[in-house]
């Protein structure tokens, strides 16, 4: 088992955001986390990324993540967040190169950026289609280009588990397809897994190997798309006939 | 500006160029003054003095250059200009680091009130007679560094609680609130030590008039030590400047690195303030201008800011000495004039950016 989450609890002040959440991810799996706004999906991602205090346990290959050093954790788990506030005119390449930080974070190796850095950076730029914009300032990029820049950064980081918070944000259909196909290819290398938060249920069905349906900070159902995306469960979670609406939307495409 | 073609490193040629400019400005500042001494004579005197010092070091007989010009240069202008250069470099580095940490080009020791906080520490040390026997500056210096560190902690704490995205308005607001808080504390201290008011007002209006070689040595020592620490953290600074959350995700030990950077920044600001009092806006003006030349990458920005800050403050000091000859302006007044202008430009740009 790559990632095992048990009885996960997170609270902001007195408000419980996550309450007894549990699930697990194996190598080669792409877990899609779906659920209504405020269900705690992003918080779950944040906790696994080591960004907030939690109760319960999050184990990466049997080791509790809060015991890991930051650079060690970053070599295991990479994160792509929803928004990317940038305030200085760093170049795309500079941002992507920082993704290699955890591979040379030690005191002696800190100023060395070896050949593998350049290779990883070039490969990540190429995969995300940002090679010809590598010298451009991030302040001048569109939302989609910024999203791809930070995706390139996390690909250069070369983690084993990739956490994506709404990866389709800011992207037009062309790039949505490109990025989802790219991540599916990335996943083909053994020893990797992906968890993504997603609102678009058809994307979740098409690309996810498992789906976790969350509501009120806990897991309502977890399994394959056919097991989880049922009319009854969707109605319970969203308080609306989502299943029927999805079918109706699709039926208009003849 | 579509293409950001800045180089990654600060190359040897860049170092040479910046050193030459800084050295040229240093010579100019030593030559010029109420009595202008020709460049050739100045260089001669400094060379002779250096030679004599080196000879004395090895026990060989030698004599220091004599005469009015030599004594003006060696015992008045040179130590002062050296102090000014070290202070400028230190404050500029501290400003560049704070701007990276807070992701805002308006963050600086003076705009946020860290310098005033350090001055408060120095003033408390004077008013209540905190000294270490045998070390003349140690009391004020320790207190200044400690209170600069405390100020930074309070400011960062406030910034986190008030607005995690750290917008320009938040930075200005925090600076204003904190400066007001510090100045009221300062007034409380003054009421307790009314007999030392004159000494105390020195700290609030910076000046490096009459400073000697021992102060210059302390300033350069601090610059070497704390600046060195900063130079080892340029990648982490880049990560912070892109975003603290992103820094954590790529594996930066956010808490530890932040602590190290804060200690280095308070060391720089605290020691500068304990020697020369509050000299505002140096850390705002120099990094802002240099960022336009070198780009935001701290690998280039930090060395450039150190040289640029030294040059800027030496020129400001020259202006302070020359503008109203034979009267001398306070150096803080000159930097504040320049700082106010740059502050407006940055603020205007930030506002237009939205």
Image (cartoon, grey):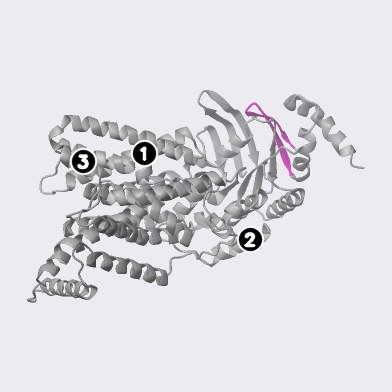
Looking at the picture, tell me which residue is in the foreground, A92 or A191: A92
Give x and y (percent) for residue B324: 25, 55
Give x and y (percent) for residue B333: 30, 48
Does the magenta portion include A222?
yes
Q: Residue at x 54, y 30 (%)?
A: A10
Q: Is residue B105 in view?
A: no
In what quadrant of the picture does the C terminus of chain A appear? top right
Q: Residue at x 43, y 69 (%)?
A: B11
> What segment carries the magenta color?
A208-223
Looking at the picture, tell me which residue is in the foreground, A213 or B195: B195
Distance between mark 2 and mark 1 Cα atoms: 39 Å
Horizontally, residue B243 falls left or right of residue A150, namely: left
Mark 1 secondary-structure assignment: helix
Badge 2 and badge 3 in a common chain? no
Mark 3 secondary-structure assignment: helix
| Closer to the eye: label 2 or 3 | 3
Q: Which residue is mark 1?
A: B153
Badge 2 and badge 1 in a common chain? no
Horizontally, residue A53 falls left or right of residue B144, namely: right
Q: Which residue is mark 3?
A: B201
Q: Residue at x 56, y 49 (%)?
A: A76
Looking at the picture, tell me which residue is in the foreground, B56 or B70: B70
Query: Farthest residue toward the left?
Result: B61
Determine which quarter of the picture holds residue B62: bottom left
Determine which quarter of the picture holds residue B76: bottom left
Give x and y (percent) for residue A190: 66, 54
Q: Which residue is mark 2?
A: A133
Distance between mark 1 and mark 3 Cα atoms: 25 Å
Give x and y (percent) for residue B119: 26, 42
């Amino acid at each position: 088992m790559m990632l095992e989450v048990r009885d996960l609890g997170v609270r902001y002040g007195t408000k419980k955001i996550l309450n007894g959440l549990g699930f697990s991810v194996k190598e080669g799996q792409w877990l899609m986390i779906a659920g209504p706004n405020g269900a705690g999906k992003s918080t779950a991602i944040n906790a696994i990324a080591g960004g907030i205090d939690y109760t319960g346990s999050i184990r990466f290959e049997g080791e509790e993540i809060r015991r890991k050093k930051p650079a060690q954790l970053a070599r295991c788990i990479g994160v792509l967040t929803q928004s990317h506030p940038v305030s200085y005119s760093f170049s795309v390449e500079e941002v992507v190169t920082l993704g290699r930080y955890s591979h040379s974070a030690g005191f002696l190796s800190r100023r060395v950026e070896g050949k593998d850095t350049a290779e990883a950076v070039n490969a990540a730029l190429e995969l995300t289609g940002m090679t010809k914009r590598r010298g451009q300032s991030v302040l001048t990029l569109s939302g989609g280009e910024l999203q791809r820049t930070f995706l390139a950064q996390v690909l250069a980081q070369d983690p084993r588990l990739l956490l994506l918070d709404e990866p389709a944000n800011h992207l037009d259909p062309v790039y949505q397809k490109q990025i989802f196909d790219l991540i599916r290819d990335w996943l083909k290398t053994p020893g990797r897994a992906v968890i993504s938060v997603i609102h678009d249920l058809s994307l979740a069905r098409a690309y996810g190997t498992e789906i976790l349906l969350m509501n009120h900070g806990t897991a309502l159902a977890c399994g394959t798309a056919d097991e989880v995306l049922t009319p009854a469960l969707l109605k319970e979670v969203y308080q609306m006939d989502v299943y029927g609406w999805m079918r109706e939307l699709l039926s208009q495409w003849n | 500006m579509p293409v950001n073609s800045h180089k990654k490193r600060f190359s040897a040629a860049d170092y040479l160029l910046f050193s030459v400019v800084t050295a040229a400005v240093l010579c100019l500042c030593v030559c010029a003054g109420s009595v202008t001494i020709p460049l050739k004579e100045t260089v001669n005197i400094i060379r002779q003095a250096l030679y004599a010092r080196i000879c004395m070091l090895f026990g060989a007989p030698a004599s220091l250059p004599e005469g009015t010009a030599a004594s003006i240069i060696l015992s008045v202008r040179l130590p002062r200009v050296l102090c000014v250069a070290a202070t400028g470099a230190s404050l500029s580095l501290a400003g560049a680091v704070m701007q990276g940490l807070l992701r805002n080009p308006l963050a600086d020791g003076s705009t946020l009130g860290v310098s005033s906080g350090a001055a408060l520490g120095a003033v408390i040390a004077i008013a209540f007679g905190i000294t270490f026997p045998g070390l003349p500056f140690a009391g004020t210096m320790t207190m200044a560094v400690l209170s600069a560190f405390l100020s930074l902690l309070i400011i960062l704490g406030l910034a986190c609680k008030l607005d995690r995205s750290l917008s320009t308005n938040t930075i200005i607001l925090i600076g204003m609130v904190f400066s007001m808080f510090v100045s009221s504390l300062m007034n409380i201290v003054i009421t307790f030590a009314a007999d030392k008011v004159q000494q105390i007002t020195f700290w609030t209006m910076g000046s490096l008039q009459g400073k000697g070689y021992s102060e210059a040595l302390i300033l350069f020592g601090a610059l070497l030590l704390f600046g060195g620490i900063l130079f080892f953290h340029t990648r982490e600074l880049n990560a912070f400047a892109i975003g603290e959350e992103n820094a954590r995700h790529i594996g930066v030990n956010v808490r530890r690195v932040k602590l190290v950077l804060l200690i280095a920044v308070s060391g720089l600001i605290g020691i500068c303030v304990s020697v020369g009092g509050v000299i505002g806006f140096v850390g705002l003006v120099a990094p802002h201008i240099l960022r336009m030349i070198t780009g935001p990458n701290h690998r280039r920005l930090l060395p450039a800011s150190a040289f640029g800050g030294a040059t800027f403050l030496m020129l400001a000091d020259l202006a302070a000495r020359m503008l109203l000859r034979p009267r001398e302006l306070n150096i803080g007044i000159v930097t504040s004039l320049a700082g106010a202008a740059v502050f407006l430009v940055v603020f205007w740009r930030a506002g237009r950016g939205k």
